[in-house]
Amino acid sequence: MPGNDGEAALTELSSLYIHIPFCVSKCPYCSFVSWPGMDNLHQRYVTALLREAKELSHSVSVQPLSTLFLGGGTPTLLAGQELADIVTACKRLFGFTHQAEISIEANPKTIDLAKLTLLRRSGINRLSIGVQSLQDTELQLLGRPHSADDAITAVRQARAGGFDNLSLDLMYGIPGQDHKSWQQTLEQALSLAPDHLSLYELTVEQGTPYYQQLEQGLLALPDEEEIAAMDQITATLCRQAGLAQYEISNYARPGYECRHNINYWQNGPYLALGAGAVACLAGRRRQKTRDPRLFCEQIESGQSVVQEEECLEPAASFRETVIMGLRMNRGVSKERLQKRYEMELNDCYGNILIRLVDQGLLEMTASHLRLTARGRIFANQVMAELV
């Protein structure tokens, strides 16, 4: 169901992320916790996941879930009934609010009308399809297992399966891409009338094949002028299509902003289940065991699956909340910062904040600190100053 405009923070413990770590293949740019070639582990993993969910429901006080997000990896590699069982278990163990946003990520080659219809009937009401590009040559460069036609078919089947809250993921800054091919992809994506777009500039992460190619001088990425032209095309076409930017990389029709992700950007608390998943409770961040086989073994033997734990000091948490909140066009609420940390922005940043405002990169409204339009262009540099 459509959400609100993102102003209301999910301050109660009512968001749950579930990680499905399986993939058809590992894309050369991917640094996420995802594992190809584990089809024989799917059923065992779901069983372990349901056991972890039951244990979690007994250990924390949870409000009925207002957002549930099944991400990956490729969640839709699992059978439709396995995914439906996960959602049913969450409803039984935690409950859902009346207008809960229940999202799942999907890749075009792993869904069909029958599976989509089953997912919709299970209660999943928001679908995010990993399209990335609608140019076949770019999809091949990205290592994606689908074609542009597969992506278009998936979108049409999603609508036929009952999804009226549909998001598409697209990527720009792809090797060899120019602003003309980006415009073609974006125009074609918008012609499919999505309710939401996530538009990510390719980031080459250390440890990926793309990083190795970049280090060896074998990866030709678009230059800054091309990226700037792509950003301008994005702003123009999305505005014309009625999709408003509400976060640096995200655009939506009014009421279709992703409430689950807004909670992340507001640095709110959230639960998490599954291999590699990260939970944040009472200012303490915990990451689970990344290897799905080891995760299953630990759950089955009653061991803890928490692999890493971090607790930020209040000042560090304050800065993190500011930086994440500035990703949203609305910015970060001064009142919420004061209530949560009993600190003022000027107390933390002093002259740095004054200088960034004077440079026209940040603006202070009566209620929020936010990036200006110019500031969004130089967002990475601004954020680096506020760390």
Image: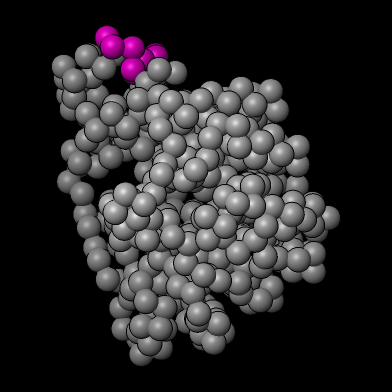
Q: Which residues are magenta?
A: 358-368
**Residue sitting at x 46%, y 31%:** 227
Q: Is residue 50 left or right of residue 136?
A: left
Q: Position of residue 259 (x, y in %)?
A: 54, 44
Q: Which residue appears farthest toward the bottom when viewing the image?
A: 301
Residue 162 position within the rendered picture, expressed as x and y whole percent measured from the top left: 80, 55
The residue shown at (36%, 90%) is 301
Is 361 magenta? The answer is: yes
Choose top left, top right, bottom left or bottom right for residue 188.
top right
Whole-percent x and y of residue 341?
25, 36
Which residue is more in the foreground, 60 or 172? 172
Residue at the (29%, 54%) spot, across then down: 216
Q: Residue furthest top?
A: 358
Q: In terms of depth relative to the viewer, which is nearer, 216 or 304?
A: 216
Is residue 323 visible in the rendered structure shown here?
Answer: yes
**As rendered, which of 240 and 294 lies closer to the eye?**
240
The quadrant the C terminus occupies is: top left
In the rendered view, tell whether residue 345 sits above or below residue 110: above
Please determine whether, in this image, residue 39 is positioned above or below residue 231.
below
The answer to whether residue 163 is magenta is no
- 222, 133: nearer the viewer: 222
Q: Residue drawn 66% across and 36% down? A: 184
Question: Where's residue 18, x and y in %?
Answer: 49, 64
Report the colour scheme. one colour
In the depicted structure, whether residue 381 falls above or below residue 146: above
